[in-house]
Amino acid sequence: MCGIVGFNGHKNGIPKIIKGLESLEYRGYDSAGIAYINNERITIKKEKGRIKNLKDLITEKENAYLGIGHTRWATHGEPTKENAHPHQQGKFTLVHNGIIENYMELQKILKDKHYAFISQTDTEVACALIDYYYQKDANIKMAILNASKQMRGAFAFGIICEDDKETLYAIRKTSPLIIAKSKDGNFIASDVPAILEFTNEYFLLNDLELAEITKDNITFYNEELKEIKKESSLFEGNLEASQKGGYEHFMLKEIHEQDEIIKNTIACYYDGTIASLDKSFPDLTKFNKIDIVACGSAYHTGLCAKSFIENYANIPVNVEVASEYRYKKCFYDKNTLVILVSQSGETADTLAALRKAKKDGITTLAIVNVVGSNIAREADYTLYIKAGCEIAVATTKAYLAQVAMFSLLAIYLGYKKGLIQEEELIEINKDIKNLPKMIRKTIDNDLYFKIADQIYENKNIFFIGRGLDYALCMEGSLKLKEISYINSVAYQAGELKHGTISLIEKDTPVIALSTEDELREKTISNIKEAKSRGAKVIYVTNKIPEEKFYDEIITIEKIHPILQSILTMIPLQLMSYKVAKNKNCDIDKPRNLAKSVTVE
């Protein structure tokens, strides 16, 4: 959710912190702030709104070698200047990503200790708690650790102290935080893009590990305050991957990258032989039931996976929203596999579902994009998609790469169980070889933009489909609503007559998907029902019908069904993009949304 950047080095850190915060804008935020050591004093500047408002408060003359910055996405208290980070209590100033669940209880105790609070935030309580322990122990590291052990919830802190103006401190629990080193100094950050302009070498903190960061050194401690050694990692991507590269928006750039992303993701695991999948995947043949757990678009990829795996591997698949799964009674046994899907690998509810499954002794498999993320590290097995940096809040390339990964899993399981024969595998391989070209051809069709120009002023838009097409409708509808703010809803086509059709008025756009031959006749019948009520039908199909029952048709290439959804989603992504552009929406940073949802 929020973004944290900190720097301690030999050159002015203020511009570096601001650039880092700008690199994290995709995470979503409503205010921004910075604290830095200037003339032996801690200076705090913060403002509601965009980072530009913060930059206007900082003069070019200001110079600081140590500082912390923050972009806030409001959880406790409204998005105001008073609630913006950094917060200061006593000797300490800090920035925070996460939620302190017991902050009210702690606040009451601290008020009895004569602490007064200006903001409505849980963060100010955390700051006061660290100061309280420091007043008792006179040891900064011990105070940070003791306070952290009293907090329930998720947090990542960047901390500076008036009594040690040469050191930056960092600690985390559940919320992501990295420590990075460069030739000019050392950084902390919520995510790698914040530091890519300066370095690609970083360290990962585990829960309740403390980092003590000076200009030249980084020292790590465990929760017993014993010094520990950590190995650094190198980020595989580059700065260019986190920039727009001439595109108007990150979302459009990321859609146009999808042919290469799918090619790279598949090539990483599969060379056309089952032997390569044997080498790439853990042995999954022993599992007779699969639970797929995820949130948002990742949940929709799970719905695609359900169709693939049930149809081609004969294994029952249950797909659950992580925020529900973590609290429900689960009916699994030792032969159940729980698959967790998350682009960031830090999604709070998905991480909690993973921990629930592990506590119950169930095997877990993670499909994630970010190497070294919490979900990746804690799962029994991890498969990485190769989507690179995805900056736009609305996922496109990561979604498609997740679908491709599930296609490979279904191919692997189906072949191992004897349900995909060698002849069919040859046909699948032929389509996989041609898939990047098909994706590029699908992307380069300007028809989607022309259709978007016809529907962007509508207040309600429906998506309908059956089977796998319904799963794609859900994702297409989510893409449209999250970036354009149009009330877009997906329905199973057969359910229209059970109440929903009453909502259709003259010229209501109905985007109808039909790519499965065995369901096509029934879907067309449902489309005609909508058309007869005055709907403006946009028909998305891989087979041109003999009769016209639509207003606009988008024809995509027909491909093996286990790969078809990869092509089908692209027109929906591009239509959504153009609708939002026509409405002058903030496409890469939709209101109220964050890229990485690290709180419940």
Image (tube, grey):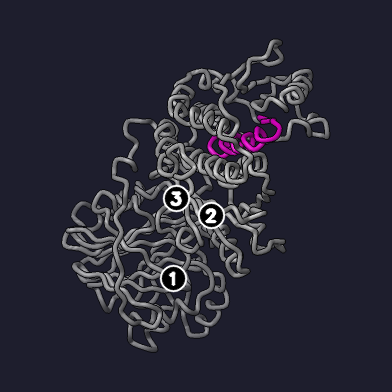
Residue topped by disc 2: 283
Q: Are marks 1 and 3 in contact (CB under 8 Å)?
A: no
Res 467 → quadrant: top right
Badge 3, how many Cα within 10 Å: few under 14, some, many 20+?
A: few
Q: Are marks 2 and 3 in contact (CB under 8 Å)?
A: no
270 left or right, relative to 216? right
Residue topped by disc 3: 279
Q: Position of residue 405 (x, y in %)?
A: 51, 43
Residue 391 vs residue 318, the one in the foreground? 318
Q: Residue at x 29, y 62 (%)?
A: 232
Residue 35 tag number? none
Residue topped by disc 1: 207
Q: CA distance from mark 2 to mark 1?
A: 30 Å
In the rendered structure, does residue 478 fall within the stretch colored magenta?
yes
Q: How many numbered marks are there?
A: 3
> Magenta stretch mostly in which secondary structure?
helix
38 left or right, relative to 261? left
Q: Position of residue 363 (x, y in %)?
A: 58, 62
Q: Position of residue 337 (x, y in %)?
A: 61, 57
Q: Nearer the viewer, mark 1 or mark 3?
A: 3
Q: CA distance from mark 1 to mark 3?
A: 32 Å
Q: Amino acid at mark 3?
A: Lys
Residue 357 vs residue 584, the one in the foreground? 357
Q: Which residues are magenta?
A: 461-485
Q: Earlier in the sequence, mark 2 or mark 1?
A: 1
Under circle 1, the secondary element is loop
Q: Amino acid at mark 1?
A: Asp
Badge 2, how many Cα within 10 Å: few under 14, some, many 20+?
A: few
Q: Earlier in the sequence, mark 1 or mark 3?
A: 1
